[in-house]
Image: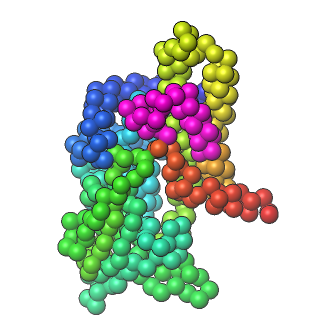
Amino acid sequence: MRRTVFNEDHESFRQTLRSFIEAEVVPHTDEWFAAGIVPRELYTKMGELGLFGITIPEEFGGAGIDSHKFLLVQYEESTRAGVTLGTNVHVLLALPYVLMLADDEQRKRFLPKFATGEEMWALAMTEPGTGSDLAGIRTTAKLSEDGTHYVLNGAKTFITGGVLADRVIVAARTSPARDDDRRFGLSLFAVDTSLPGYTVGRKLDKLGLRVEDTAELSFVDVKVPVEDLLGEENQGFSYLGKNLASERWGIAAGAYAQAAAAVRFAQQYVQERTVFGKSVASFQNTKFELAACKAEVDAAQAVVDRTLEALDAGELTPAEAASAKLFCTEVAHRVIDRCLQLHGGYGFMNEYPIARLYADNRVNRIYGGTSEIMKTIIAKDMGL
């Protein structure tokens, strides 16, 4: 079926991005995979290409396009090439908070460097022992007596992009929780990672997404200027909730793109691989397996495209975003597993993109809210 979400501008962007990935990323993928991190210079090059500034207003160096469609193109092209760019947190997660909460002075200070990649951003919510329970955050930010800064103390874990980040949006408790509202008292801060007392701990050794660095962070009496408070004090939890729909759509879109790439990798492999004097593609089982996978990918694409239009129109509900995430991540899990099976023993080798895709995909059903939490949200919306 003909897709209607993209126009000529999106397809032109696709070709530019595909050329960039082939020239600047693919030749170094194995090296970066082994190192578990991409070089900082890659982000500068991506900034020059305009990848970070698409939704940033023109006055701050961006393109001023209020749409997630270019981001979907990026997902499709990076997975098509079997690479990970490691910039989802910077663009999909951190940027919406800046655009939504930053005052005029902050926008002038933050957005130009955000667009160029001079400053890379990350998001620090999860703490050891809290997981999905953000109301249980124990990191504190206490206002100084002279009112010039907050003193930040605490720790965060599982922070994607935390090793290379120049600024991190940190959720911290500025007031005690209320008896009738344990979500009250959280605030968000755009923390400069060069401040004294800010420490990057271990770079975590992950199963997948190995080129996307993930770190532990600690804060010991970090003096955060009051000018770096995002939004109002004690309203952080409500801010976090407003971006969940876009975050979960992004995970759904990424999972769909991974599944589509898996089918592409498997189709190419079975056409080239021969057993018993015949191509693997000639066996009926292979044809049936790939046909079933293709049908699931088509369905996931339809869900992603439909919810993309709703997201861009500001109409995507939390339950719809949860449904898209649940469906697409489960589809990707099934499809990638079946496509790896068609590779046989080679599918278990990291030199083949399907193996890395298998590991990368697993976290989709965990972060951004587990599949179980998605089901809870959907059931509640059904009145159950």
Query: In the image shown, does 316 or 276 lie closer to the viewer?
Result: 276
Query: In the image shown, does 125 or 330 lie closer to the viewer?
Result: 330
Where is residue 106? Give x, y as percent. 32, 63
> Is residue 346 a member of the stretch shown in magenta?
yes
For the question of whether residue 331 can be seen, the reply is yes
Residue at image position (32%, 78%) is: 152
For the question of whether residue 63 can be seen, the reply is no
* Residue most extreme to the top: 277
Q: Is residue 352 shown left or right of residue 32?
A: right
Residue at image position (63%, 61%) is: 373
Region rendered in magenta: 329-358
Where is residue 290? Give x, y as percent. 62, 25
Query: In the image shown, does 35 or 110 lie closer to the viewer?
Result: 35
Q: Is residue 217 shown left or right of residue 173?
A: left
Q: Quadrant of the C terminus?
A: bottom right
Residue at image position (35%, 84%) is: 142
Using the image, determine if residue 191 lies above or below residue 265. below
Q: Identify the image quadrant of residue 43.
A: top left
Q: Identify the image quadrant of residue 281.
A: top right
Residue at image position (38%, 27%) is: 18
Q: Is residue 44 shown left or right of residue 121?
A: left
Where is residue 80? Give x, y as percent. 45, 29
> Is residue 337 a member of the stretch shown in magenta?
yes
Where is residue 339? Give x, y as percent. 56, 30
